[in-house]
Image: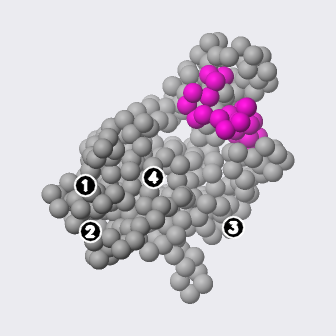
Amino acid sequence: MQEIFNLYGWQVSSYEPIQQGLINSTYSIQTNNGAYILQSINHKIFKKPAAIDDNINVISNYLQKHHPNYLFTHLVPTLKGNTLVQWEGGFYRAFPKIDGYALSVLDNENQVKEAAQQFAGFTAILKNFEVNQLKDTLPDFHNLNLRYHQFSEAIIKGNTHRIADTKEAISFLASHKKYVDIYNHFIEHAEVKKRVTHHDTKISNVLFQKKEGIEKAICVIDLDTVMAGYFISDVGDMCRTCLCTVSEEEKDLNKVVVDSAKWKALEKGYLHLMKDELSNFERDHFFYAGQFMIYMQALRFLSDHLNNDVYYGAKYEGQNLVRTLNQIRLLEQYNQLN
């Protein structure tokens, strides 16, 4: 990696991998000029790394001009001024290392409120940013019409044995197609607008600091999926990943329980900064955001299971079915909040 270090002019005293995160390879770098995060972009997932680079830079320039005190993971240029490095078939970028830590599990509702407020603040501070400047780094990422179409094809063209064995799950998801209809009504409504949207609002994508015993979220990270989008994507993914104490990998469905206190904390944290930015129609669909995202992820997991695990892969037989049933249970539990 010395050749990459040289591009930045770094004299590196130490570096080590950071294990958190599933898509990109990340390293903590200590240099003579401070600490940095170096990351390789997984271009099997992100086909256009330059689009990610462009999006982060255009937002970075806007924030430096209009909100210079906002804590943001600005990209570090090489000695030649590039913020995206292509080396031996890989793509790399660097950020200054921010003093903070990420969480992989939630202990309390304050963490949910803090995280929700940071994701809301990211969208809110960019309310006057021209969102059409952003490129789609993952086209149709949260397009529920596409995900239902893929599900419909999978139950016809997929593995016949798996289709036969999952009739109950297939029936459940098909019977809840109303969420697709609501989605179409939502995105076509005159009061709905596209904003700068993170699109991956799991708890590990917020940095925290603890000061005088109080835990505070300080900034959002992992901006690869930042695109123009709808607020239901960010709120929905928080509902999907922050309201339950177990992950989508949990096989014991009795453990898949939604915490109502965390739901209230999420709502309070997000609306604290976004309430006045959302239209009445959008606010009326705040609860739907969770239904939208949990349902869509269940569709995606089951489609992949029926298609022999070609997208997510599987570490054991039936893993994507486990994930599907987990998300169906999560949706049922979530609906009990309403």
Q: Position of residue 27 (x, y in %)?
A: 43, 61
Mark closer to the chain start, 2 or 4: 2
Question: Residue at 30% across / 60% down in the picture?
Answer: 2
Residue 4 magenta-highlighted? no
Disc 2 to disc 4: CB gap under 8 Å: no
The one of 263 and 22 positioned closer to us in this rendering: 22
Question: Residue at 57% across / 27% down in the picture?
Answer: 310
Residue hosting label 4: 25
Mark closer to the chain start, 3 or 2: 2
Q: Residues within 10 Å of mark 1 (few under 14, many from 20)?
A: many
Residue 200 visible to an observer of this rendering: yes
Q: Nearer the viewer, mark 3 or mark 2?
A: 2
Question: Residue at 64% across / 40% down in the picture?
Answer: 294
The one of 222 and 4 positioned closer to us in this rendering: 4
Q: Amino acid at mark 1?
A: Thr
Q: Amino acid at mark 3?
A: Asp
Residue hosting label 1: 83
Residue extent of the magenta highlight: 306-331
Q: Amino acid at mark 2?
A: Trp
Q: CA distance from mark 3 to mark 2?
A: 38 Å
Q: CA distance from mark 4 to mark 1?
A: 17 Å
Q: CA distance from mark 4 to mark 3?
A: 27 Å
Residue sticking out furthest to the left: 80
